[in-house]
């Protein structure tokens, strides 16, 4: 029999890529999603998989809905990807962020423990938990954790609760400490998509300026499609552990801008970029660079997409999307014009 998996946050970037991966491996996939007046399924439609999974209503704020979802899915594996994941929002909504990203994970752990105690559990931890702490300038599984945002603090609580439930109740719980991972379906509010979207718009003459915060902040950026494979590999091991998932490189926001503008042939990119203090974090996180040696040695995992390839992929997707929108708008405009012209001709004939 094929395995079944329950994915929370299934409508997000990682959820869509993970669905695609698991379906390719023959899994029966259940996705937990909050009920909205307008379903947010565009990422699943992007991969043409929305009809290949079963969507269950649920919310990390509601214990009963989580219990119902776990009982329905009877999962062999649970991947908790749901979160309020935008760091900037965590300062304006710290309580909500803590409820979802912190206590929400405990609610899910309780549901799994009660109704699927043999299921393997994956918790999406984050490199943001390190803050500015490092080991010789980099971060691995042994580096001290010192979060610098409400988001990272909530994630740290969930990280340790996941480990505590493993040690207390003999659950197969893993935490993936994932460094920044991007893709063409990243949320537009994140700096990488903000940059690639703006670059494509500037190239097409739809935008004049890109406003950013700290251009010198440095991150370890990888491709989301590579990173979900590491999540799956963690749950295929004999022993549950924590793993850093990263490329082992770091690049600044400035580097990302240069690469993105370079992908459309714009070398003097600085004249298109301005600084807006609204985008500067209250507590800045200067550099994140992971050491993925454990994931490489134990899981046999390595990132396949390079930084340059990632940026190129994202920019090309933006150009395709915006050009398609332009074509649709042009077609709609032509149809309106033809319709108005036809009305005039009919009116003339009737006269």
Image (cartoon, helix red, strand yellow):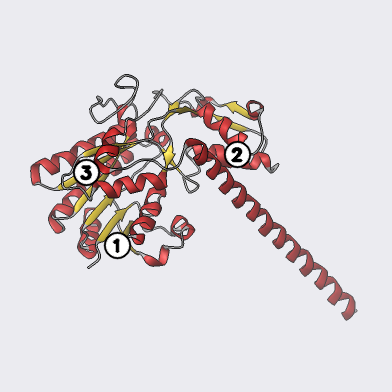
Closer to the chain start, of discs 1 and 3, is 1
Query: Is residue 97 depicted above or below 74 in this figure?
Result: above
Give the CA separation, mark 1 to mark 3: 20 Å
Q: Give the number of the disc on residue 183.
A: none
Left or right position of 177 against 168: right
Give the residue number, with chain letter if any, for mark 3.
174
Q: Dot 3, how many residues are within 10 Å of its Cα: few (below 14), some (14-19), or many (20+)? A: many
Callout 2 secondary element: helix
Left or right position of 114 against 14: left
Q: Name the quadrant of the C terminus.
A: bottom right
Query: Is residue 194 depicted above or below 81 in this figure?
Result: above
The picture places residue 142, in percent across and down from the top left corner, at 23, 27
Give the residue number, with chain letter if any, for mark 2.
198
Which is more foreground, mark 2 or mark 3? Answer: 3
Residue depicted at x 22% and y 53%: 63
Seen from the viewer's position, the closer of residues 106 and 5 is 5
The picture places residue 341, in percent across and down from the top left corner, at 82, 68
The picture places residue 70, in percent across and down from the top left corner, at 22, 59
Closer to the chain start, of discs 2 and 1, is 1
- Asked whether the residues under the numbered discs 2 and 3 touch, taking CB atoms below 8 Å apart as contact, a structural biologist would say no
The picture places residue 100, in percent across and down from the top left corner, at 30, 44
Residue depicted at x 62% and y 34%: 262
Give the residue number, with chain letter if any, for mark 1.
27
Callout 3 secondary element: strand
Quarter of the view holding residue 103: top left
Give the CA separation, mark 2 to mark 1: 37 Å
Quarter of the view holding residue 222: top left
Regarding residue 161, the answer to whether it shows in the image is: yes
Labels in figure, total: 3
Q: Residue furthest top?
A: 136
Q: Dot 2, how many residues are within 10 Å of its Cα: few (below 14), some (14-19), or many (20+)? A: many
- Asked whether the residues under the numbered discs 2 and 1 touch, taking CB atoms below 8 Å apart as contact, a structural biologist would say no
């Amino acid at each position: 029999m094929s395995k079944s998996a329950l994915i929370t946050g299934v409508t997000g970037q990682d959820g869509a890529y993970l669905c695609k991966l698991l379906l390719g491996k023959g899994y029966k996939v259940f996705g937990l999603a909050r009920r909205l007046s307008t379903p947010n399924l565009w990422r699943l439609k992007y991969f043409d998989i929305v009809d290949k999974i079963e969507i269950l209503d649920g919310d990390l704020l509601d214990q009963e809905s989580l219990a119902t979802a776990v009982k329905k899915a009877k999962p062999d594996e649970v991947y908790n990807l749901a979160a309020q994941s935008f760091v900037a929002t965590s300062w304006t909504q710290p309580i909500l962020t803590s409820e979802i990203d912190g206590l929400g994970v405990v609610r899910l752990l309780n549901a799994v423990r009660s109704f699927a105690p043999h299921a393997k559990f994956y918790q999406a931890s984050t490199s943001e938990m390190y803050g500015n702490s490092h080991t010789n300038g980099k971060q691995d599984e042994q580096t001290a954790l010192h979060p610098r945002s409400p988001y990272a603090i909530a994630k740290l609580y969930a990280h340790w609760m996941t480990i505590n439930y493993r040690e207390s109740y003999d659950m197969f719980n893993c935490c993936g400490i994932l460094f920044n991972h991007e893709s063409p379906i990243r949320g537009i509010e994140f700096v990488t998509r903000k940059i690639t979207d703006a670059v494509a718009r500037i190239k097409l003459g739809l935008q004049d300026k890109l406003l950013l915060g700290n251009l010198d902040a440095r991150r370890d950026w990888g491709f989301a499609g590579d990173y979900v494979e590491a999540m799956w590999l963690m749950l295929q091991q004999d022993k549950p552990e924590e793993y850093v998932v990263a490329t082992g490189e770091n690049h600044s926001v400035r580097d990302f801008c240069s690469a993105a503008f370079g992908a459309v042939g714009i070398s003097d990119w600085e004249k298109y970029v301005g600084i807006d203090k609204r985008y500067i974090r209250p507590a800045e996180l200067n550099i994140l660079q992971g050491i993925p040696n454990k994931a490489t040695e134990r899981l046999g995992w390595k990132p396949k997409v390079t930084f340059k390839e990632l940026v190129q992929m994202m920019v090309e997707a933006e150009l395709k999307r915006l050009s398609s929108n332009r074509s649709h708008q042009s077609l709609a405009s032509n149809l309106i014009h033809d319709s108005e012209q036809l009305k005039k001709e009919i009116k003339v004939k009737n006269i």
